[in-house]
Image (cartoon, coloured by chain):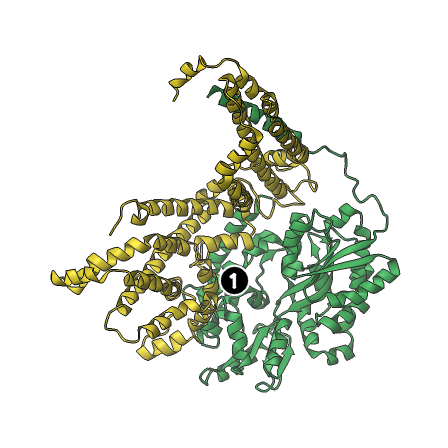
Chain colours: A yellow, B green
């Protein structure tokens, strides 16, 4: 492309493109210079409207607030200023896109004039906009909304991790300040924080892999079992297996929490008693609670996998199995070489979402034993995963900044793993399996 | 590309200029200088208690001509809402809050010191006035007091025992039968076990809420924890009574008639009565060493916010606080909400005591009660103390070791979370 430019340069008969681009420093003037009056006036009006409505906001709150986080209480509320600042940045970002479009438009049309070509009429411009820009036009309101509903909070948490927002730095008594990476230094530099973080993180990983793998294994196992050709009463069996999914999870968890009570719960008094096992201290021994949690999540999670795998199994062509039988394959070989790869091919991406879901599975942890039992020498309970620990940090001790720092670390990990895994799964690659 | 760098430079310059602007200073803000009578005061009241406020508010409006506009929030949400509504025209002048919220609220700058004369102070019990005081400044007037008491099943126990030794005997006898219990309490929750710890002579924070001096692993604390441990070790308290849902388990056993007595607060009376238990209420029995149990006490109060000072309405806000907590309005409030006001004249009123035995028992206990420390550092005490009690009760640690651990964690937490002020 670049090679063509010097050649084209010779075709230019005038310098309109440069003048139009330069004039676009005030958006709209370039278009007016190109004698596209309507477009020029429209751009100019938008620019003026933008400046009039937001100038004060940018100058008095937004950017100033983002940099200083306020200078004087009670007038300045740092948290609000931070939000205003992010909104300003987002608005300026939109403005920059707008300005870029204006510059480009002025340059393009100037270039056409330089080359002696006719400019589009208003009717043509309108057609152009509708034909080429239609998807953008339809998408833009939703996109705009998404930026403020999703992107803004993410930036907010990101920035919060670099402030000292806690109990002692709150409006109206105090302002908060930018502290750089102090939160991360504290998290990894002080013994109490570091050991808590590492313990919680280790258990989070064990929990994620343990609970998710168990629920997947059980779901797949039962689905294959129920899918046997000569099994009678499939409908009823399937219905029963789906039931744990049909009951709202929080109800099941609360009931389980009662059942696991050491003295009064059915698990110790009835089930273990019948087998002759002495009562287990489910709620006061961290390892026992962990075991119970993995069991409960397996119970809550397997029906979903079960239903999905059942669907996949029904779509596997019978001929594959017939051919395998002819070749003399055993049942296990058929499962390993036909059933399992085909199941994995279809549901691998969903399985990854199961892992990320359990990584952040707040409900079970919080409702079953509140992250307890408490362990001496650390800031979190014995079964607290990162997300429930963050909840405790914000809701009970108002350690917002550190909680934000942990959130950052946590999201970075989840995102990395999820992206890496998604890209590796076969469904995301082009080749066809069958 | 050169064009782009220029563009970037120009835009960042523009942003920089904007960032340097900032709001103009309007000089010193005209703080509370105007003593003009406001048209209305905004009051934030506890959930479902608004009707108790209405009558008093109407009279206040009649007397002074100031409208009272009230809004109901769950009392635990009031602090959060102050953070959001503080800056706006919805900012309240008067709020209700539990006294343990005073420390954090003053730290955050929500509350305004009050100027209360001795005569008014003398209306309320000393312990409740103490609870309204933070770092030698009075921030509010008490509205209701709560502390845990001894609740027993009258069908199983004819008379409230005087001492814990008697309670111990009752429990010993009760557990002979399978699934039956004597006295139950959730002592792994420090709110409930503080009475024992205090009675044995230990303390949470040193004199004047000095957070650098923590008395939870001294000899008396070990003695107290060993005493608590005895109840678990001998099977008088089941180990299923430990942990997150302990309170529900305890109330469940009492409601089913499986327990003779429990330690709980006034909020539980209704539930027990509705479950058909013929309850009696008395102050907590004396400990084996003859000491009273210094149970933790929560005092709800009325406070004037710092926003009132900004609006120049604090004088009238305080007037309103004094008005709704006066004897007449407090009594009317008790009739409607059953929240027990810590008024001195009520405890001394024989007729009232005989008519309201439950409230009287709570009042009696509140005389020995200790107001929960209001300093923010208190937040770090609950969890480690729960750990200490439950690890000792489940024989995972000795009392001394468990308490040393707990105090260690509390100190570390205080160092980590509260040293930056």
Left or right: A183, with A46 as reference point: left
Q: How many dots with numbers?
A: 1
The residue where tag 1 is placed is: B219
Q: Is residue B117 visible?
A: no
Residue A64 at x, y percent in the picture: 63, 33
The image shows residue B10, relative to residue A387, as above or below, that is: above
Residue B164 at x, y percent in the picture: 57, 76
Callout 1: helix, strand or loop? Answer: helix
Residue A200 at x, y percent in the picture: 42, 53
B135 or B331, which is in the foreground? B331
Image quadrant where residue B296 sits? bottom right
Q: Residue at x 30, y 60 (%)?
A: A312
Residue A295 at x, y percent in the picture: 36, 65
Category of crowding for the residue at label 1, using alpha-carbon neighbours closer than 10 angstroms: few (below 14), some (14–19), many (at least 20): some
Left or right: B323, with B211 as reference point: right
Left or right: A418, with B157 as reference point: left
Chain letter of the residue carrying label 1: B
The image shows residue A56, relative to residue B91, as above or below, that is: above
The image shows residue B261, relative to residue A51, as above or below, that is: below
Image quadrant where residue A260 sits? bottom left
Q: Is residue A236 visible?
A: yes
B41 or A221, which is in the foreground? A221
């Amino acid at each position: 492309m670049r090679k063509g430019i010097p050649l084209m340069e010779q075709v230019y008969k005038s310098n309109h493109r440069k003048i139009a681009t330069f004039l676009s420093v005030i958006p709209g003037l370039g278009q007016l210079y190109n004698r596209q009056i309507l477009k020029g006036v429209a751009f100019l009006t938008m620019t003026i409207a933008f400046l009039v409505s937001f100038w004060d906001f940018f100058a008095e709150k937004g950017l100033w607030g983002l940099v200083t986080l306020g200078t004087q209480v009670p007038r300045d509320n740092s948290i609000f200023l931070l939000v205003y600042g992010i909104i300003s940045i987002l608005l300026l970002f939109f403005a920059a896109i707008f300005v870029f479009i204006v510059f480009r438009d002025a340059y393009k049309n100037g270039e056409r004039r330089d080359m002696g070509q006719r400019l589009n009429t208003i009717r043509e411009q309108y057609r152009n906009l509708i034909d080429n820009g239609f998807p953008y036009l339809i998408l833009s309101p939703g996109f705009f909304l998404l930026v403020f509903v999703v992107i803004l909070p993410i930036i907010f948490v990101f920035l919060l991790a670099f402030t000292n927002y806690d109990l002692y730095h709150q409006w109206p008594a105090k302002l908060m300040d930018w502290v750089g990476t102090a939160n991360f230094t504290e998290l990894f530099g002080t013994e109490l924080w570091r050991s808590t973080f590492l313990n919680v993180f280790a258990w989070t990983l064990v929990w994620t892999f343990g609970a998710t793998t168990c629920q997947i294994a059980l779901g797949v196992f039962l689905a294959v079992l129920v899918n046997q050709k000569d099994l009678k009463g499939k409908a009823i069996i399937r219905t029963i297996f789906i039931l744990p999914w049909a009951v709202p999870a929080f109800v099941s968890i609360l009931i389980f929490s009662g059942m696991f009570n050491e003295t009064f719960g059915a698990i110790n008094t009835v089930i273990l008693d019948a087998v002759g096992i002495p009562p287990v201290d489910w709620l006061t021994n961290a390892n026992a609670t962990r075991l119970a949690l993995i069991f409960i999540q397996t119970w809550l999670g397997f029906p979903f996998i079960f239903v999905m795998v059942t669907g996949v199994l029904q779509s596997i062509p019978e001929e594959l199995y017939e051919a395998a039988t002819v070749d003399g394959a055993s049942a296990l070989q058929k499962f390993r070489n036909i059933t399992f790869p085909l199941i994995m091919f279809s549901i691998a991406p969903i399985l990854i979402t199961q892992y990320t879901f359990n990584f952040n599975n707040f409900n079970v942890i919080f409702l079953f034993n509140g992250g307890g039992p408490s362990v001496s020498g650390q800031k979190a309970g014995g079964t607290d995963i990162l997300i429930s620990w963050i909840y405790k940090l914000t809701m009970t001790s108002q350690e917002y900044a550190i909680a934000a720092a942990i959130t950052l670390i946590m999201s970075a990990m989840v995102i990395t793993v999820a992206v890496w895994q998604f890209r590796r799964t076969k469904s995301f690659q082009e080749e066809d399996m069958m | 590309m050169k064009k782009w760098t220029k563009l970037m430079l120009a835009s960042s310059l523009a942003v920089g200029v904007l960032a340097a602007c900032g709001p103009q200073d309007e000089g010193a803000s005209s703080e509370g200088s105007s003593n003009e009578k406001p048209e209305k005061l905004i009051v934030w009241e506890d959930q479902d208690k608004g009707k108790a406020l209405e009558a008093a508010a109407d009279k206040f409006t009649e007397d002074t001509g100031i409208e009272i506009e009230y809004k109901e929030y769950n009392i635990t949400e009031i602090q959060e809402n102050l953070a959001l509504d503080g800056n706006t025209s919805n900012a309240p002048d008067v709020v209700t809050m539990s006294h343990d919220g005073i420390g954090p609220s003053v730290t955050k700058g929500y509350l305004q010191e009050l100027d209360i004369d001795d005569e008014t102070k003398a209306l309320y019990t000393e312990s409740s006035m103490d609870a309204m005081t933070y770092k030698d400044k009075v921030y509010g007037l008490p509205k209701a007091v709560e502390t845990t008491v001894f609740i027993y099943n009258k069908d199983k126990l004819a008379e409230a025992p005087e001492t814990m030794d008697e309670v111990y005997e009752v429990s010993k006898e009760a557990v002979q039968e399978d699934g039956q219990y004597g006295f139950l309490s959730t002592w792994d929750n420090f709110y409930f076990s503080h009475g024992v710890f205090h009675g044995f002579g230990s303390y949470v924070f040193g004199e004047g809420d000095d957070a650098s001096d923590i008395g939870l692993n001294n000899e008396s604390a070990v003695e107290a924890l060993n005493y608590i441990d005895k109840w678990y070790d001998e099977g008088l308290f089941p180990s299923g009574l430990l942990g997150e849902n302990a309170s529900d388990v305890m109330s469940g056993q009492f409601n089913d008639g499986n327990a003779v007595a429990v330690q709980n607060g006034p909020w539980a009376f209704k539930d027990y009565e509705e479950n058909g238990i013929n309850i009696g209420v008395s102050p907590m029995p004396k400990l084996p060493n003859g000491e009273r149990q210094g149970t933790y006490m929560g005092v709800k109060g009325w406070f004037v916010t710092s926003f009132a000072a900004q609006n120049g309405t604090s004088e009238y806000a305080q007037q309103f606080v004094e008005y709704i907590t006066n004897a007449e309005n407090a009594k009317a409030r008790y009739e409607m909400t059953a929240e027990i006001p810590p008024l001195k004249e009520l405890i001394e009123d024989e007729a009232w005591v005989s008519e309201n035995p439950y409230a009287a028992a709570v009042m009696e206990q509140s005389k020995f009660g200790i107001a929960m420390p209001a300093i923010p550092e208190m937040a770090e005490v609950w969890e480690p103390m729960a750990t200490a009690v439950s690890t000792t009760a489940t024989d995972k640690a000795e009392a001394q070791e468990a308490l040393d651990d707990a105090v260690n964690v509390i100190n570390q937490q205080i160092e980590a979370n509260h040293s930056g002020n």
